[in-house]
Amino acid sequence: MAGVELADIYAARVRIASVARRTALIPSPSLSARAGADVRLKLEFLQDTGSFKVRGAANTILALDAPARAKGVVTVSTGNHGRAVAHVARLVGTKAIVCLSNLVPENKRAAIRALGAELVVHGQSQDDAAEIAFDLVRTRGMTMVNPFDDARVVAGQGTIGLELLEDFPEIDSVLVPVSGGGLISGIARALKSARRDFRVIGVSMDRGAAMHASLAAGKPVLVPDVDTLADSLQGGIFLDNTHTFSMVRELVDDLVLVTEEEIARAMAYAFDREHLCLEGGGAVGIAAILAGKAGVLGRHAAIVLSGTNVAAPVLTRVVAEHRAWLKDHV
Ligand SMILES: *Cc1c(COP(=O)(O)O)cnc(C)c1O
């Protein structure tokens, strides 16, 4: 069955409570002034493993019965999901194999290895790496913890929407990074259950945005993975997508694209002005506001800051290269 209901998200919240924390929501006076709205930041990168992905991973792995746990879990990832799966698998004492493409940065590979998972590096795209993962499911009976296209994963990510409603009852719009669409589908389901006129705006990088291309084509399509600061947003949506493509089509009001330069500015801005360390994929919501691309927001908007796993030399270079821009623009 395609789709995830509000009840699934409440069930997820109970299941993952011991693993995923409730993250803070903080006001941003400077982004509020820029957007002409009350803008708050959801600090989802403060989860263990540095991204929201523990929510969906925990909701899937904690639901497995003993025989499934004995066989272990396998996944394919652009880095952060694999890290979350490795973390949760270790907590419950089950084996994890993480399949990655050659594009995944070394800092993310090392973090997954450090959590005790087995790494398999294959190919030049997430789709290449996925072939190996699905083989392991077939040959070894391991459970696939899908990075986005799975009802349990979507419901887990949707718990962010419940927290937003509770901590910010006036909220009427949200900006969410989009790759495979699990994060935005879950959040949109939770928020649109509360208010039909809620505005959900997705943001992706303009280089290889698979969901955006798929919506334009009317069906899931392949896009080549290209190098980007938003490496956690790389990867396709899977050609046999069963959940997130239809949920995004139904629930997301707008999907905007930001350039590499806009992402870099947002990372520099977050570090310099908000004192937050964000990876490119975690900063695209801020990028959309700074670039004036967020379109019509409501009066009370949240930006989901989804991840922090950027290598320190990359972040310091980006900040150094944007000193002059920061001085002139924000
Ligand atoms: C995975 C990820 C996303 C996108 O999530 P999807 O469910 O694939 O759309 C956004 N930001 C970060 C930091 C991520 O790791």
Image (cartoon, grey):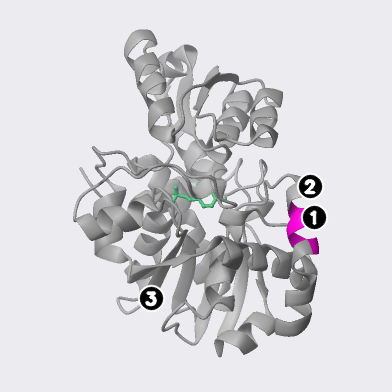
- Badge 1 amino acid: Thr
* Label located before the other in sequence (2 or 3): 3
Give the x, y percent position of residue 77: 49, 34
Q: Which residue is mark 3?
A: 199
Q: SS at mark 2?
A: helix
In primary-sequence order, the first of circles 3 and 1 is 3
Q: Residue 305: percent from the left, percent from the top?
A: 60, 61
- The alpha-carbon separation of the residues under discs 2 and 1 comes to 5 Å
- The residue beneath circle 1 is 316
Q: Position of residue 299 (x, y in %)?
A: 49, 87
- Whether label 2 touches label 1, CB < 8 Å: yes
Question: Of the numbered discs in the image, which one, if any, rests on residue 313?
Answer: 2
Of the pair 181 and 325, the residue shown nearer to us = 325
Disc 3 and disc 1: Cα gap in Å?
Answer: 34 Å
Closer to us: 187 or 252: 252
Estimate how packed mark 1 is, as few (under 14), some (14 to 19) or many (20 or more) residues with alpha carbons within 10 Å.
Answer: some
Magenta residues, start to end: 315-320
